[in-house]
Image (cartoon, grey):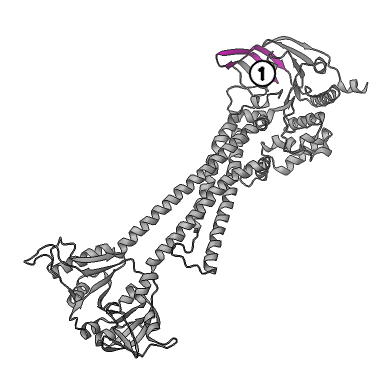
């Protein structure tokens, strides 16, 4: 699903050139749930941005679902993101003046799906996230866990192939974190590829594979037997 | 992404509702700009109407011509020679120049200062006595309130009939008395009153016309021994011929007939209404131009205000725009959204300015009419439909222009930067 080879990325700030990614080779299969770990500055967020086509890369190759992602115009990139990728962020990035339904339906607005159908689909996903009663509420009336589930609903609504989650539990307490991870595991079971950037060990242990980045390179990539959150919570 | 997309409108409303006070002040800039433009345009047209009203009572394609003294010696005649127009001149002009619409020779028999020249019973007064052609009433129309004006038969038969001004009637007759059919003694000769005329002009010029007695031109010449002298001419040009051109043509013939040097421009005096009117029109073209410049300048200030606010809005909404980009908004989506907000704000505010401005003008107009305020400077202020439509068009364009820079700024926001966590 995601194939990176010899990926390099540098940031130029004034006179300084910051080499962030120094040759990343990575294959992520369809339906895999992978966590990316690393200390701050290791390049994990940059890597996620490139995979999410929010940022470009300098050297190497990035193939998403077999298609080379390179030199896209902003408009093309927007279409790719809209069709292929769902985002989940640490700070949720919900639009504060829109209610839950409208937030979830936003990607469909840019797919030019009419309002009625859009809101119907949004309600479906809200229901799946257990937020049906909160449909008319704005994000600031919700708890952290609810906000993140709302964000997950938004990332799912356009039926993406890949979900990229940047520290999805970073702003949540451990109980809520586990709830969110449970939701993500459920989604993964349906075959959606999932990439989670985290620095929490227990979160990473809930994925199929831990990739550790260090100073712009992959230090190791270990497949593990993931912990099922549902069983952990009930135990 | 049609303009009547409900979501688009919702986006706009929500965005503008975010900060009501700021939206209000921004909108006020535009409101004020268009309001001032409308008020100024209305006042301008009020001023123009008032001034041009004086011209409405005159044929603007006419000119007046009278004799002066020659200033150049010619064909054995010295300079400083006095001469008179005469009845043959009238015939010659009528025959030779087909561009003449109406020609009215006139002769002032007595001026109002000539002591008391009009007597009726024990009433005496001094009025201007003018010899007139029927055509005069076509060139500078009078409002005939009783009877009729001088006609062709009066002229041919040299009848002793008179058309008196309204003030003449008031002074020489009892209130409510109909002067038509009554007699007035003018400089020792009895004239039958056939009509009463009221001036449609104002002030001094109305007074002049209202204190005038018109008698047939031929009667005046014969009765008071003026021979065949014509005092002066009022002439109008046919449609399509400029009065100034006709004036040159007429003067050339007259110079020839009276042996005046072709270059002697001071021998024949004239007043060209058309030329004066043109100068006047140009003045108002100038005033209107100034109004548009000032108005658009004011509007521009409002527009810069909108642009400025939209820039702040974009900055504040960096994160929101980033989110939209991440979930699939194209740069075009973002651009159109920002510009739509800007256009909506300017058009909405401007529309209010337009409505309130026009409303105020109507109110002033209503007050002027209701309280019968006779103003020399101001009459029927208003903004015509075309001006209102062009003002609205300007607003929409202003909105687009005001939104362009903020929209570009919004598009340049990189989703990565906008979404940067750890805020």
Question: At numbered mark 1, what does the secondary structure look like: helix, strand or loop?
Answer: helix
Task: Quadrant for residue B251, please give it.
Answer: bottom left
Mark count:
1
Residue A15 vs B160, above or below: the answer is above
Residue B179 vs B362, above or below: the answer is below
Quadrant occupied by the C terminus of chain B? top right
Residue A72 vs A101, above or below: the answer is above
Q: Which region of the structure is painted magenta?
A: A1-28
Residue A54 vs B144, above or below: the answer is above
* Magenta span includes B392: no
Residue nearest the observer in this picture, B328 or B323: B323
Task: Quadrant for residue B419, please give it.
Answer: top right
Parent chain of label 1 = A
**Is the magenta region chiefly helix, strand or loop?**
strand
Quadrant occupied by the N terminus of chain B? top right
User: At x 65% / y 28%, what residue is drawn?
Assistant: A80
Looking at the image, the residue that sits furthest to the right is A235
* Magenta span includes A5: yes
User: At x 76% / y 18%, what residue is drawn?
Assistant: A198
User: At x 14% / y 67%, what residue is drawn?
Assistant: B256
Looking at the image, the residue that sits furthest to the top is A219
The answer to whether residue A195 is left or right of residue B31 is right
User: At x 56% / y 45%, what residue is drawn?
Assistant: B29
The answer to whether residue B85 is left or right of residue B370 is left
Q: Position of residue B179 (x, y in %)?
A: 38, 87
Residue nearest the observer in this picture, A203 or B306: B306
Q: Which residue is mark 1?
A: A46
Q: Residues within 10 Å of mark 1 (few under 14, many from 20)?
A: many
Q: Position of residue B397 (x, y in %)?
A: 52, 44
The answer to whether residue B152 is left or right of residue B291 is left
């Amino acid at each position: 699903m995601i194939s990176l080879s010899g990926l390099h990325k540098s940031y130029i700030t004034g006179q300084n050139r910051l080499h962030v990614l120094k040759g990343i080779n990575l294959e992520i299969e369809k339906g895999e749930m992978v966590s990316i770990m690393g200390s701050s500055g290791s390049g994990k967020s940059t890597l996620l941005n490139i995979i999410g086509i929010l940022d470009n890369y300098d050297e190497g190759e990035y193939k998403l679902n077999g298609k080379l992602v390179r030199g896209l115009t902003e408009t093309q990139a927007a279409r790719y993101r809209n069709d292929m990728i769902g985002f989940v962020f640490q700070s949720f990035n919900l639009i504060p003046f829109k209610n839950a339904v409208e937030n979830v339906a936003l990607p469909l607005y840019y797919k030019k799906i009419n309002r009625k159908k859009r809101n119907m689909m949004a309600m479906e996903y809200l229901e799946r996230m257990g937020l049906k009663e909160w449909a008319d509420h704005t994000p600031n009336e919700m708890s952290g866990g609810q906000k993140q589930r709302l964000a997950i609903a938004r990332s799912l609504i356009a039926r993406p192939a890949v979900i990229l989650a940047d520290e999805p539990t970073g702003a949540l307490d451990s109980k809520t974190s586990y709830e969110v991870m449970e939701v993500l595991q459920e989604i993964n079971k349906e075959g959606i590829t999932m990439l989670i950037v985290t620095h929490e060990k227990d979160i990473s242990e809930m994925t199929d594979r831990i990739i550790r980045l260090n100073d712009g390179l992959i230090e190791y990539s270990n497949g593990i037997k993931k912990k099922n959150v549902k069983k952990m919570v009930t135990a | 992404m049609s303009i009547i997309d409900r979501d688009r409108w919702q986006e706009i409303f929500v965005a503008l509702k975010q900060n009501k006070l700021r939206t209000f002040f921004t909108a006020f800039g535009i409101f004020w700009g268009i309001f001032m433009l409308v008020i100024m345009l209305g006042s301008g047209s009020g001023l123009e109407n008032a001034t041009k009203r004086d011209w409405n009572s005159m044929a603007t394609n006419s000119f007046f011509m009278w004799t002066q003294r020659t200033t150049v010696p010619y064909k054995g005649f010295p300079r400083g020679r006095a001469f008179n127009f005469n009845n043959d001149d009238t015939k010659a002009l009528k025959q030779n120049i087909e561009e003449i619409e109406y020609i009215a020779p006139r002769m002032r028999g007595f001026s109002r200062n000539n002591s008391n020249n009009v007597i009726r019973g024990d009433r005496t007064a001094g009025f201007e006595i003018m010899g007139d052609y029927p055509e005069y009433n076509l060139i500078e129309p009078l409002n005939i309130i009783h009877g009729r004006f001088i006609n062709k038969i009066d002229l041919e038969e040299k009848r002793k009939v008179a058309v008196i001004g309204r003030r003449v009637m008031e002074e020489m007759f009892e209130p409510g008395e109909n002067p038509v059919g009554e007699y007035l003694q003018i400089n020792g000769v009895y004239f039958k009153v056939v009509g009463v005329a009221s001036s449609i002009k104002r002030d001094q010029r109305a007074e002049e016309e209202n204190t005038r007695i018109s008698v047939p031109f031929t009667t005046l010449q014969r009765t008071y021994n003026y021979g065949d002298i014509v005092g002066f001419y009022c002439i109008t040009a046919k449609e399509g011929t400029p009065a100034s051109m006709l004036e040159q043509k007429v003067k050339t013939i007259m110079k020839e007939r009276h042996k005046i040097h072709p270059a002697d421009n001071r021998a024949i005096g004239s007043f060209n209404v058309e030329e004066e009117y043109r100068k006047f029109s140009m003045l108002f073209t100038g005033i209107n131009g100034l109004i548009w410049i000032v108005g658009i300048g004011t509007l521009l200030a409002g527009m810069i205000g909108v642009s400025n606010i939209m820039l702040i809005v974009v900055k504040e909404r960096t994160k929101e725009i980033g989110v939209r980009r991440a979930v699939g908004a194209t740069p075009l989506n973002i651009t159109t959204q920002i510009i739509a907000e800007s256009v909506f704000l300017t058009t909405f505010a401007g529309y209010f300015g337009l409505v309130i401005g026009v409303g105020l003008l109507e109110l002033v107009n209503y007050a002027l009419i209701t309280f019968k305020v006779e103003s020399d400077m101001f009459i029927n202020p208003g903004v015509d439909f075309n001006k209102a439509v062009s003002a609205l068009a300007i607003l929409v364009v202003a909105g687009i222009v005001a939104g362009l820079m903020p929209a570009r700024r919004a598009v340049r926001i990189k989703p990565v930067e906008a979404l940067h966590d750890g805020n």
